[in-house]
Image (cartoon, rainbow, N blue to C red):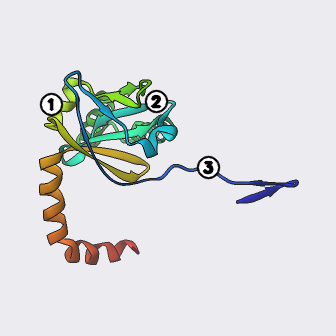
Amino acid sequence: MGKSGDHLCITKYIMFIGEYNHSIDEKGRMNVPAKFRRDLASGVVVTRGLDHCLFVYPKSEWGVMAEKLSRLPVSQKKSRAFARLMLAGAMDVELDGQGRVMLPEYLRKYADVKKHVVVAGLYNRLEIWDEDAWQEYRTKTELESDDIAESMSELDI
């Protein structure tokens, strides 16, 4: 927070957290959690994520990510592969009047998303998971939580 004259200035930031269960309709549309719609009203970018989920970024956050991806060394095979995964798979999507986004078929296929999905808030992005895949991933991660936490201590977390 900063002070400008007599007005208090608050820096706006977006933070997505939580798990939300949703369905995908026969046309490939998914309701965005109501809590996030205002922050995503200017549109989103949906792309292939890691662990076979979909990443959903507000356009402003996508700009930051795309800039970082563009700086990866093109001479390194893994850098090229990661940039292709994220950038070539990306699609600009607008929320419709009912707060839904269209998930392109190629992205639904990549994430093996069927009818029921979990939308997970992860600070600056959302992840969309097939419900069964999310349950499996979450169970495995919870079982390994002590080891994961210990390894995070090296990152000062």
* Residue that numbered label 3 is attached to: 12
Whole-percent x, y for residue 151 in the image? 27, 74
**Tally of marks:** 3
* Sooner in the amino-acid sequence: mark 2 or mark 3: 3
* Tag 2 and tag 3, C-beta contact below 8 Å: no
Identify which residue, 73 or 140, lies in the foreground.
140
Where residue 123 sits, quadrant-wise, is: bottom left
* Residue that numbered label 1 is attached to: 109
* Tag 2 and tag 1, C-beta contact below 8 Å: no
Callout 2 secondary element:
loop
Q: Residue furthest right?
A: 5
Q: Amino acid at mark 3?
A: Lys
**How far is disc 2 from disc 1 in space, using C-alphas?**
22 Å
In the figure, 79 relative to 4: above or below? above
Q: Mark on residue 73?
A: none
Q: Amino acid at mark 1?
A: Lys
Identify which residue, 28 or 145, lies in the foreground.
28
Q: Amino acid at mark 2?
A: Gly
Specify whether 61 is left or right of 142.
Answer: right
Specify whether 131 is left or right of 66.
Answer: left
Whole-percent x, y for residue 156 in the image? 41, 75
**How far is disc 2 from disc 3 in space, using C-alphas?**
17 Å
* Tag 1 and tag 3, C-beta contact below 8 Å: no
Callout 1 secondary element:
helix
Neighbour tally class for label 1: few under 14, some 14-19, many 20 plus, Cα within 10 Å = few
Neighbour tally class for label 2: few under 14, some 14-19, many 20 plus, Cα within 10 Å = some
* Residue that numbered label 2 is attached to: 43
* Sooner in the amino-acid sequence: mark 1 or mark 3: 3
